[in-house]
Image (spheres, rainbow, N blue to C red):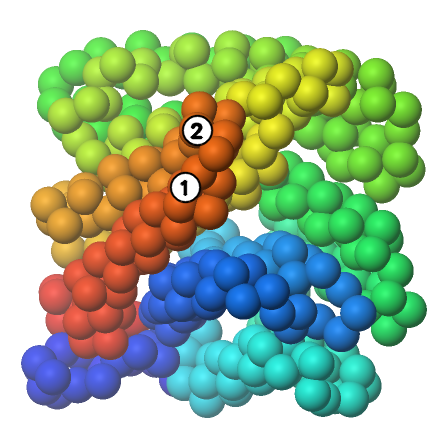
């Protein structure tokens, strides 16, 4: 693996492959920008990008295994060196892993025209490639981060199960796989978000001379992770509706109690901090909506999945990408106005997509179009602002 050379080698030096977060955060943002408008056009045209399967399944797969997969890779390739004290991932191994991810997205884009074996080979190569890079240093340390490797393996197994469903045109299995995968992603956000949101909030408040005063409730931490893991298990095993609703409702309550101790009201002056809170807040909202939907089918709760997918997952990804890209390129942790606007656009897109169809039931297509446009604009701003940051050398001249 290569290590980046200092910025004095040239201010315009191409540094995209100098560290793991660089290409994958840019790919995640670019893919989010393109994939959602592409899905809307496919939806409007009535096209089916997956043979014999509803188009929504392509959309769900590419959001979870494409967009979220790239973000997870960028996070892991950046966090593992920090966790283990090992050298960062860069150069040819990183470029090869990027090529594998791109191949998987290309294969799924043309899945209706390619042999399934080609699609499966291209798609299922990515996570093993990621594990080849990150597993050795994590396993050498044998600390609390080892379970992350198990989570990656589970995600790979779920991707394989989706391909099995595709091969057999089993719509119900494919839907269940996507639901369980979303649950695994939310479990990751519960674990990692539970570490970084209060930590970054405390740092920001202390920097302003305020007493952080964040509340840490150990019993909440234990029961919350158990509740989220139980929700994944309930979806996997197709538990009775009442059981799933009870677990989702309990998890929503625990998330609400957890975030209530994080001094959210004192972060509103700092966009790079409050967006973390806004993203996390979609967890109790989305899980609560799911419980309500399962018990009552109330119109406002129908689109609970977008509250969790777009609200919790995508917003947390945007929040982490914008923050990590600044911090790991030697820049101050202060986002630009355009980035703050991108935060607002993504939150607006989520709210419109989740609640708009119930408020204006006769304008569903228009609401989806508006939400898609706001989503695309949010990630277009991310790509615009962060492409020079991610492709150029560190501002402080250090490697990475």
- Whether residue 363 sits left or right of residue 299 in the image: it is left
Front one among 243 and 43:
43
Front one among 363 and 275:
363
Q: Which residue is mark 1?
A: 367
Residue 12 visible? The answer is yes
Residue 2, located in which quarter of the rendered image?
Answer: bottom left
In the rendered structure, which disc, 2 or 1, sits on the residue that comes first in sequence? 2
**Residue at x 84% of width, y 19% of height:** 243
Residue 93 visible? The answer is no
Q: Residues within 10 Å of mark 1 (few under 14, many from 20)?
A: many
Q: Secondary structure at mark 1?
A: helix
Residue 100, located in which quarter of the rendered image?
Answer: bottom right
Residue 133, image x, y percentages: 59, 73
Image quadrant in which the C terminus is located: bottom left
**Residue at x 42% of width, y 11% of height:** 260
- Whether residue 43 sits left or right of residue 241 in the image: it is left
- Whether residue 76 sits left or right of residue 174 in the image: it is left
Residue 384, image x, y percentages: 20, 65
Residue 149, image x, y percentages: 68, 56
Q: Secondary structure at mark 2?
A: loop
**Residue at x 56% of width, y 82% of height:** 106
Specify the label residue 360 is tagged with: 2
Task: In the rendered view, tell whether residue 118 sits above or below residue 216.
Answer: below
**Decide: marks 2, 1 in contact (CB < 8 A)?**
yes
Measure the alpha-carbon separation of dots 2 and 1: 8 Å
Front one among 233 and 49:
49
Task: In the rendered view, tell whether residue 353 sits above or below residue 95.
Answer: above
Residue 218, located in which quarter of the rendered image?
Answer: top right
Q: How many numbered circles does the render carry?
A: 2
Front one among 213 and 178:
178
């Amino acid at each position: 693996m290569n290590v980046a050379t200092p910025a004095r080698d040239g201010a315009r030096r191409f540094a995209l492959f100098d560290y793991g977060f660089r290409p994958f955060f840019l790919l995640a943002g670019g893919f989010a920008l393109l994939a959602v408008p592409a899905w809307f056009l496919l939806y409007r045209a009535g096209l089916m990008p997956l043979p014999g399967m509803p188009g929504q399944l392509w959309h769900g797969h590419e959001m979870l295994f494409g967009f979220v997969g790239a973000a997870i890779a960028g996070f892991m390739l950046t966090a593992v060196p920090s966790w283990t004290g090992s050298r960062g991932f860069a150069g040819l191994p990183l470029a090869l892993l990027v090529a594998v991810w791109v191949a998987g997205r290309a294969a799924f884009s043309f899945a209706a025209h390619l042999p399934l074996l080609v699609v499966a080979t291209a798609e299922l190569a990515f996570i093993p490639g990621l594990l080849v890079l990150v597993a050795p240093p994590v396993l050498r340390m044998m600390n609390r981060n080892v379970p992350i490797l198990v989570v990656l393996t589970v995600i790979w197994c779920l991707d394989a199960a989706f391909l099995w469903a595709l091969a057999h045109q089993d719509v119900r299995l494919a839907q269940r796989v996507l639901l369980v995968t979303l649950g695994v992603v939310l479990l990751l956000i519960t674990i990692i978000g539970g570490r970084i949101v209060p930590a970054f909030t405390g740092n920001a408040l202390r920097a302003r001379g305020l007493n952080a005063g964040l509340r840490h409730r150990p019993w909440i931490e234990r029961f919350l992770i158990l509740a989220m893991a139980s929700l994944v298990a309930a979806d996997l095993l197709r538990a009775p509706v009442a059981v799933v609703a009870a677990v989702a409702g309990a998890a929503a309550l625990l998330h609400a109690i957890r975030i209530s101790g994080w001094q959210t009201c004192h972060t509103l002056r700092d966009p790079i901090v409050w967006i973390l809170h806004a993203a996390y807040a979609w967890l109790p909202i989305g899980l609560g909506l799911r419980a309500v939907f399962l018990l009552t089918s109330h119109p406002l709760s129908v689109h609970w999945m977008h509250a969790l997918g777009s609200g919790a997952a995508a917003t947390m990804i945007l929040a982490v990408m914008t923050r990590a890209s600044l911090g790991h390129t030697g820049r101050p942790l202060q986002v630009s106005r355009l980035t703050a606007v991108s935060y607002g656009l993504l939150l607006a897109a989520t709210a419109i997509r989740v609640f708009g169809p119930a408020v204006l039931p006769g304008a569903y297509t228009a609401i989806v179009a508006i939400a898609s446009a706001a989503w695309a604009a949010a990630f277009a701003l991310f790509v615009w602002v962060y492409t020079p940051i991610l492709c150029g050398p560190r501002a402080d001249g250090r490697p990475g």
